[in-house]
Amino acid sequence: MEEKKENNLHRIASITRTTKETDISLTLNLDGSGQGEIDTGIGFFDHMLHGFARHGLFDLSIKGKGDLQIDTHHTIEDTGIVLGNAIGKAVGDKAGMVRYGSCILPMDEALILCSLDLCGRPYLVYDLHLTREKVGDLETEMVREFFYAVSYGAGMNLHIKQIHGSNNHHIIEGAFKAFAKALDEATRWDERITGVLSTKGSL
């Protein structure tokens, strides 16, 4: 167990992505305590990312500037890409890591399932039923785009499903928190695992 931890002592990743549309700087510590310093210029999105950090017990710092005079699309999508890349970098060689994580999370009337596999093969199955165009300053169609970008940036098989729910705020927040809990589970070590958890010998 100590050897596995030695190989993955610093599960921290810092990534900057700059385009003509956005400038995103992000640092992720998978073994943090739930601290978040987040400013993307999109209030409700920042609130969701704070919840992700807190409930996953990740330390997350994000400073993002984007062309919000157009809409939120580029800022949210690029933040997802950078967060996904940071997850992929922070997990390192994945030796001793559980790899799979799942959570069914209740939030008032909403019940959200998130299940993921840090397998290196990106795929998103998204099944949230949002009925409003916006929650706060967040276009609700961007929730799917964010999780799509994260899954492909991280090389992650990601399933997010709404079991119950009618309040759009609760549904979205439940999805972010369930994702955090599932990722926290998937990135834990298990002393019974030798190398990576795969019959192929690599992920």
Image: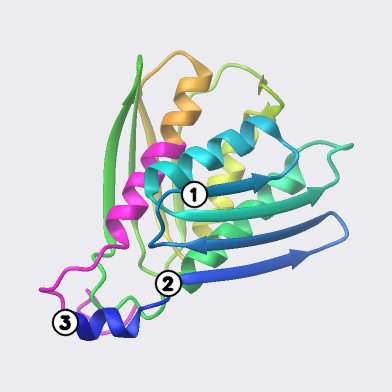
Picture coordinates of residue 147, whole percent (x, y): 53, 47
Q: Is residue 78 visible?
A: yes
Between marks 3 and 2 in the image, the one whose residue lies nearer the viewer? 2
SS for callout 2:
loop
Q: Earlier in the sequence, mark 1 or mark 2?
A: 2
Q: Within 10 Å of the Cα at label 2, are there few (<14), some (14-19), or many (20+) other Cα atoms?
A: some
Q: Residue tagged by mark 3?
A: 194
Task: Please tell me whether residue 199 is drawn above or below residue 181 in the rendered image.
Answer: below
Quarter of the image with the N terminus is bottom left
- Which residue occupies the foreground of this view, 201 or 79? 79
Q: Nearer the viewer, mark 1 or mark 2?
A: 1
Q: Answer few, some or many: residues within 10 Å of disc 1's Cα (few below 14, many 20 plus, some between 14 and 19).
A: some
x and y, in percent, of residue 177 in the image: 41, 38
Magenta stretch: dominant secondary structure: loop
- Numbered tag placed on residue 11 in the rendering: 2
Q: x, y (%) of residue 203?
A: 34, 77
Q: Nearer the viewer, residue 92 or 159?
A: 92
Q: What residue type is disc 1 on?
A: Gln
Side (left or right) of 50 relative to 127? right
169 vs 184: above or below: above
Residue found at x 43% / y 48%:
34
Which callout, 1 or 3, points at the residue further toward the start of the chain? 1
> Which residue is denoted by mark 1 in the rendering?
35
Bounds of the magenta span? 176-203
Q: Is residue 70 left or right of residue 177?
A: right
What secondary structure is found at the residue carrying circle 3? Answer: loop
Residue 133 located within the stretch drawn in magenta: no
Q: CA distance from mark 1 to mark 3?
A: 31 Å
- Residue at screen point 62% across, 17% down: 132
How far is the residue under mark 1 from the one under mark 2? Answer: 15 Å
* Residue at (79% x, 65% y) in the render: 18
Q: Quadrant of residue 106?
A: top left
